[in-house]
Each structure stands twice: as structure tokens, then as C-alpha cells.
Amino acid sequence: MSDVSPLETEVAKLIVQTLTLKVDPAQIQPEAPLFGDGLGLDSIDALELSLAISQSYGHQIRSDDPETVATFASLRSLCQSIEKHRMK
């Protein structure tokens, strides 16, 4: 198991809280997929999560950005994108 950064812990909590998931944020593995076989998120979840990330970190995740799929690939990739683009 890889080490979890403080931002990954924070964003895992944000994901669970925003989407009212019945999972312990600590159980979200940084490299596990967020969609499909991972947490099973869908496109509506992505929209809700994008809004929460924008409000919390000032990072706008746009649906027309070609990197969006890679950004939402895992908790770790999402956190790397937040770190790179955050305004708050």
C-alpha cells in the first residue's frame, strides 16, 4: 500500500461527504479507479465533485478539457491536478 498524502486524505473525505458515499474515506486507495470497478462513480458524480473541488480549492475541472478523464482516473491523479491548479 502506498503512502497517502495529507491532500489525498482531505480529498477522499471531500469525495465521501460530497457524494454521500457509504465508505470510509481511509479505505479509498490513492491509485484505485474512481469510476467503474473502483468507487463506481458516474458522470453526475463527476459534476458534483468538480463543483466541490472548485469551491474548496479554486480549481476548475472542465468537461471539455482533454485531461479530464486522466484527472478523474484515481484519487492520486485528482490530487495531483488540484496541486497543480489550485487557487486556494
Image (tube, rainbow, N blue to C red):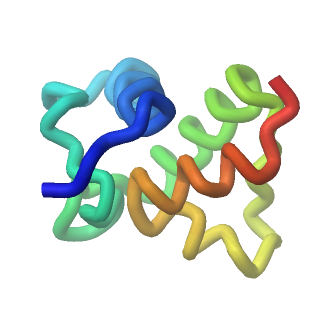
Q: Is residue 21 above or below residue 46?
A: above
Q: Nearer the viewer, residue 73 or 84?
A: 84
What residue occupies the far bottom of the structure in this picture? 66
What residue occupies the far right of the structure in this picture? 87
Residue 25: x percent and y percent?
Answer: 24, 29
Residue 70: x percent and y percent?
Answer: 56, 74
Q: Residue at x 74, y 22 (%)?
A: 55
Q: Nearer the viewer, residue 75 or 61?
A: 75
Horizontal arrangement in the rendering, residue 6 relative to residue 33 (left or right): right
Q: Residue at x 37, y 23 (%)?
A: 13
Q: Residue at x 82, y 31 (%)?
A: 58
Q: Is residue 72 above or below residue 13?
A: below
Horizontal arrangement in the rendering, residue 76 relative to residue 35 (left or right): right
What residue occupies the far front of the structure in this picture? 3
The C terminus - image quarter: top right
Q: Residue at x 43, y 29 (%)?
A: 6
The N terminus - image quarter: bottom left
